[in-house]
Amino acid sequence: MQPLSEEERERTLPSGEQKVLHNRVGWSRTYLTKTKLLEAPLRGHFIFTQRGLDVLVNESATIDSNYLK
């Protein structure tokens, strides 16, 4: 995996109000929490559940929109 460039990290949504990176991380967090792969015990704190850890070690698992459905 290649790190994001400075340009990619600074790109904003068309509204100009939010960075694309922050938006994508927020939606990812939402979907991972809804599917019980991640939990948020405190505001701003996130941990993988046992289910989430099991998915992470499964080399054949692909976490995409189909998986999250």
Image: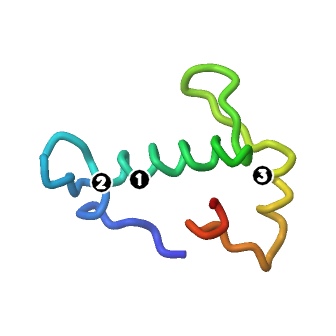
Inspect the image, locate mark 2, and give the three-letter code of the amino acid beneath it: Val
Mark 3 packing: few (<14 Cα in 10 Å), some, or many (20+)?
A: some
Q: 54 left or right of 35? A: right
Q: Position of residue 49 (x, y in %)?
A: 80, 42
Mark 1 and mark 2 residues within 8 Å of each other at the beta carbon: yes
**Residue for point 46% across, 48% down:** 27
Inspect the image, locate mark 1, and give the three-letter code of the amino acid beneath it: Arg
| Residue in the foreground of this view, choosing between 48 and 51 | 51
| Pointer 1 residue | 24
| Pointer 3 residue | 52
Inspect the image, locate mark 3, and give the three-letter code of the amino acid beneath it: Gly
Q: Is residue 2 above or below residue 16?
A: below
Separation of residues labelled 1 and 3 (CA atoms): 19 Å
Separation of residues labelled 3 and 2 (CA atoms): 24 Å
Mark 1 vs 3, N-terminal side: 1
| Pointer 2 residue | 20
